[in-house]
């Protein structure tokens, strides 16, 4: 199998002259890349009704979608930034300087040959050989706002799976997608879900028919390629009764001097007995605000599992949630976060129990390096008169350097005497004995540290598909370089 | 008109006239203190009531925080109190009712000669002004407590003052009783403990209502443990079931000192308790314990803060709640490890025993850590009595009701057994039993 897109940040630095990190001596420019792009459609900077109408017109959307967008815009403008509980860093987002829509205008491609050369070149730089890409089950690669490449393998298409971008799906299959669109995460859920609802473009809409077990994981890959350009993709996955699906996304972004904004909305619906596994490896550049709302609804005996790995970005705020709506539904969040200098990974999970005998499990591990800050924030809610609900939450934080920072802010509400909840969190540092032992056997301190950190996340990383866990390991190695001494 | 309504809501019964009458009654106290009270009243009157978006009031029933219907209580004589004696061998006792001292048992022989001061705050303000000024309400207020701390400062009348000079070891606990008496009585209990180097003492605070009237209580206790001091603080809150109560605590632990505090919460309609331990020098230890039995429609809101400000300090928190009927509890705790406070050892645990299908337990156990060489962990659980344990006891011929009671007391015992004094342990256990068997 190929290394997925994010591995692209690993190859040797393209810009050797860029300054090393002033604090830790880490060369953060490693893997930065950017191309000059010609955009056919550009909504300009700033957000107004005009921007929203422009986006909708370019996409030739049905009137109800425009209405949905305009309503969302009003809600976005009306809502304050959540700085009463979140980091004040949010106030540094300049919404007027962001481009809300850019597109190069080409239609989603079906074959590799049709992909324009300059886009191919970008993929090349990302380290994914064309040869290997052909093996991928289906790549809906989002190039800026539009899907530039999509190749769903025949096997998947033959199973009756619909895999399209948001514009296409809402136009061609409204009967399937309209029913669930914006229902799991209502527009007004939070300021950033409202923003996404107003200006969304791209993303994946997937429908898996009854009883279909999708044999290959579906993948999508996002990147941001323009300064001050926000990426607002929208994903909606519907797994019909008894079906199964694994979806993977990875993101990279080239580095620019001013901050960019990524604000996605991902909605999952697992109908009776369905299983959805959603895997994210996030490795945005260190100037990106990554403010994402992800939530799934699990119906009777359905299972939703979020595997969420955050390594990049300046500030990530992301709390994947599962609403356990049907009896015996199951929700799980596996979260790995790595915060290096200048980064704040504010991640966590939400488990809303809404039916009897539902179970949820949260395992979160974070690593703080240098001056990095990682935060776990979670909600577990078991309302009145439910029976036999269970939640288990474990949060472990590893602090690498003297003044690395970690926070834990869980909120647990339990009503009634027929449910049980347990939460545990611990904080530790890398064992000096372990490091000493490895150094005795000829490893450098840096290698030993890397190995030790990989050991810390190993039990979670092993749940990832192979190529993702290999990639994760390489990303950790890169981040740990220069963190000691 | 609308501005008038607004003002009323912000201060409720505690109007400028209320404050002026109070100030007139304590006009003989030192000027610096009266000035502080004036400033505090202004602050209280201008601060908003807790809002839904205040993180430090999350999950609390804000509608219950109405401040009207309370009054400055009339003086009360000891004979008028429904007073039950505290069954403990004691080194001394102060009994306050409606903010004023009504009875006292003097210090055990020899202690006053060794410099121990156990007297009213009024006395201390007038005779030990410098000592009081340096310690009275001198600690920073945790977020969320601003308005009610200001109210307490403004309207604090009298309270207990304990000073332990270097090397004093008290043989038996000191007891302070704070009574509220009469419908609508607003009381402001205060206990200030200053323990110098190498002292050892136990102080017990009892918060009680005389009768079943509706009361308002807004209290505070501050503990200062100097170099090597060993302090035990135990409080039993048994306000009437109609009482709205706020109680806050600030504990300062210096080098090699150890403070153990145990708060027993049984009374009140809606009670909020805030506790802040600051570990300021190497070797400092703080043990924070609490037991709550919540029944009927009671709401107990407990907020804690463990601040590790120096290396090599430890803190251990265990808060246990048993919930019956439609009761609601909130536990919100935060361990803060400052940058460079290496070798911190901090633990925080909240256990909720759900004994009813209508009860609600909220847990917000938090950590904020800025040093890497630390041991910090926390845990929170909410569950019913373990059916296996219940079955085990039933299998040995113990009826279900009895088995549940045994298991529930076993649940409390983990906290109570931390008390070194057996007499104190028994008296607290009896209080819980009394409530439980109602």
Image (cartoon, rainbow, N blue to C red):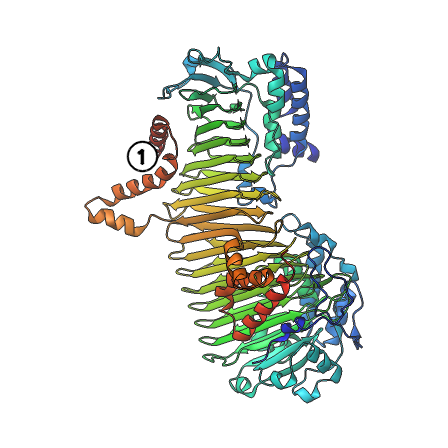
Q: Looking at the picture, does residue A355 appear above or below residue B128?
A: below
* Place of residue A298 in the rendered image (x, y in percent of width and height, measured from the top left): 48, 66
Residue at the location (42% across, 49% down)?
A: B381
Q: B112 or B182: nearer the eye?
A: B112
- Residue identifier under label 1: B437
Residue at the location (61% across, 52% down)?
A: A401
Q: A483 or A115: nearer the eye?
A: A483
Residue at the location (79% across, 77% down)?
A: A40
Q: Looking at the picture, does residue A135 appear above or below residue B343?
A: below
Q: Helix, strand or loop at disc 1?
A: loop
User: Quarter holding the C terminus of chain B?
Assistant: top left
Q: Looking at the picture, does residue A11 appear above or below residue B298?
A: below
Q: B271 or A258: nearer the eye?
A: A258
Which quadrant of the view contains residue A374?
bottom right
Direction left: furthest residue: B397
Total label count?
A: 1
């Amino acid at each position: 199998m190929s290394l997925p897109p994010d591995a692209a940040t690993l190859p040797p630095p393209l810009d050797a002259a860029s300054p090393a990190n002033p604090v830790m001596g880490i060369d953060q420019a490693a893997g930065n890349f950017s191309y000059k792009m010609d955009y056919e459609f550009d909504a300009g900077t700033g957000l107004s009704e005009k921007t929203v109408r422009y986006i909708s017109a370019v996409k030739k959307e049905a009137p109800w979608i425009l209405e949905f967008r305009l309503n969302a815009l009003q809600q976005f403008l009306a809502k304050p930034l959540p700085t009463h509980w979140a980091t004040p860093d949010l106030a540094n987002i300049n919404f007027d300087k962001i481009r809300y829509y850019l597109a190069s205008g080409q239609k989603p491609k079906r074959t590799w040959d049709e992909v324009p050369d300059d886009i191919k070149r970008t993929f090349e730089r990302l380290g994914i050989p064309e040869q290997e890409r052909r093996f991928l089950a289906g790549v809906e690669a989002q190039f800026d706002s539009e899907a530039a490449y999509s190749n769903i393998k025949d096997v998947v298409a033959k199973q009756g799976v619909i895999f399209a971008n948001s514009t296409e799906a809402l136009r061609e299959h409204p009967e399937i997608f309209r029913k669930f669109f914006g229902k799991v995460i209502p527009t007004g859920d939070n300021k950033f879900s409202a923003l996404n609802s107003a200006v969304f473009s791209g993303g994946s809409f997937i429908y898996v028919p009854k009883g279909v077990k999708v044999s290959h994981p579906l993948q999508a890959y996002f990147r941001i390629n323009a300064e001050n350009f926000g990426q607002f993709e929208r994903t909606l996955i519907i797994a019909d009764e008894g079906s199964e699906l694994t979806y993977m996304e990875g993101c990279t972004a080239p580095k620019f001097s001013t901050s960019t904004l990524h604000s996605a909305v991902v909605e999952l619906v697992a109908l009776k007995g369905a299983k959805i596994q959603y895997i994210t490896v996030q490795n945005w550049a260190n100037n990106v605000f990554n403010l994402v709302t992800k939530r799934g609804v699990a119906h009777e005996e359905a299972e939703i599992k979020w595997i969420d790995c955050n390594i990049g970005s300046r500030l990530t705020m992301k709390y994947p949630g599962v609403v356990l709506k049907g009896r015996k539904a199951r929700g799980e969040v596996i979260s790995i976060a790595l915060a290096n200098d200048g980064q704040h990974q504010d991640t966590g999970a939400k488990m809303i129990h809404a039916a009897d005998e539902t179970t949820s499990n949260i395992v979160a591990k974070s690593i703080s390096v240098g001056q990095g800050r990682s935060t776990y924030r979670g909600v577990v809610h078991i309302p009145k008169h439910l029976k036999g609900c269970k939640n288990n939450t474990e949060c472990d934080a590893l602090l690498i350097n003297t003044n690395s920072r970690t926070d834990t802010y869980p909120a647990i509400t339990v009503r009634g005497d027929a449910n049980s909840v347990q939460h545990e969190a611990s904080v530790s540092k890398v064992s000096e004995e372990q490091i000493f032992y490895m150094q005795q056997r000829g490893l450098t301190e840096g290698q030993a540290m890397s190995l030790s950190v990989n050991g810390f996340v190993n039990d979670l990383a092993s749940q990832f598909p192979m190529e993702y866990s290999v990639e994760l390991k390489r990303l950790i190695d890169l981040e740990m370089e220069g963190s000691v001494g | 008109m609308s501005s008038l309504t607004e003002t009323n809501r912000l201060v409720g019964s505690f109007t400028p006239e209320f404050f002026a009458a109070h100030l007139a009654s304590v006009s003989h106290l030192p000027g610096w203190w009266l000035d502080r009270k004036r400033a505090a009243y202004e602050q209280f009157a201008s601060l908003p009531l807790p809002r839904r978006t205040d993180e430090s009031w999350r999950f609390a029933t804000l509608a219950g925080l109405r401040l009207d219907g309370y009054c400055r209580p009339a003086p009360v004589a000891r004979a008028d109190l429904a007073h039950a004696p505290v069954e403990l061998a004691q080194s001394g006792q102060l009994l306050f009712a409606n903010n004023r001292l009504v009875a006292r048992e003097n210090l055990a022989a020899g202690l006053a000669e060794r410099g121990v001061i156990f007297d009213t705050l009024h006395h201390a303000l007038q005779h030990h002004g410098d000592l009081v000024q340096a310690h009275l309400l001198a600690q920073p207020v945790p977020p969320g407590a601003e308005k009610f701390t200001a109210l307490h400062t403004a309207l604090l009348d009298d309270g207990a003052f304990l000073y332990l000079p270097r090397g004093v070891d008290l043989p038996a606990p000191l007891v302070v009783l704070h009574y509220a008496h009469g419908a609508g009585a607003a009381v402001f209990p205060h206990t200030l403990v200053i323990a110098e180097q190498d002292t050892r003492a136990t102080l017990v605070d009892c918060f009680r209502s005389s009768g079943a009237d509706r009361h308002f209580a807004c209290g505070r206790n501050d503990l200062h443990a100097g170099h090597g001091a060993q302090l035990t603080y135990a409080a039993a809150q048994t306000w009437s079931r109609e009482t709205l109560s706020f109680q806050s605590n600030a504990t300062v632990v210096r080098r090699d000192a150890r403070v153990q505090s145990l708060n027993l919460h049984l009374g009140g309609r809606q009670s909020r308790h805030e506790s802040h331990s600051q570990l300021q020098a190497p070797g400092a230890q703080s043990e924070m314990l609490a037991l709550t039995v919540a029944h009927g429609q009671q709401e107990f809101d407990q907020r804690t803060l463990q601040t590790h400000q120096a290396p090599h300090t430890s803190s251990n928190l265990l808060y246990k709640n048993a919930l019956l009927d439609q009761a609601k509890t909130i536990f919100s705790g935060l361990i803060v490890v400052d940058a460079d406070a290496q070798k911190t050892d901090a633990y925080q645990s909240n256990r909720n025993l759900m004994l009813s299908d209508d009860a609600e337990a909220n847990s917000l156990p938090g950590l904020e850590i800025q040093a890497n060489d630390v041991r910090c962990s926390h845990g929170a659980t909410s569950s019913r009595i373990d059916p296996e344990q219940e079955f085990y006891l039933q299998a040995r011929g113990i009826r279900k009701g009895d088995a549940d009671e045994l298991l529930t007391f076993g649940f409390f015992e983990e906290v109570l057994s931390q008390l070194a004094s057996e007499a104190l342990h028994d008296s607290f256990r009896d209080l819980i039993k009394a409530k439980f068997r109602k």
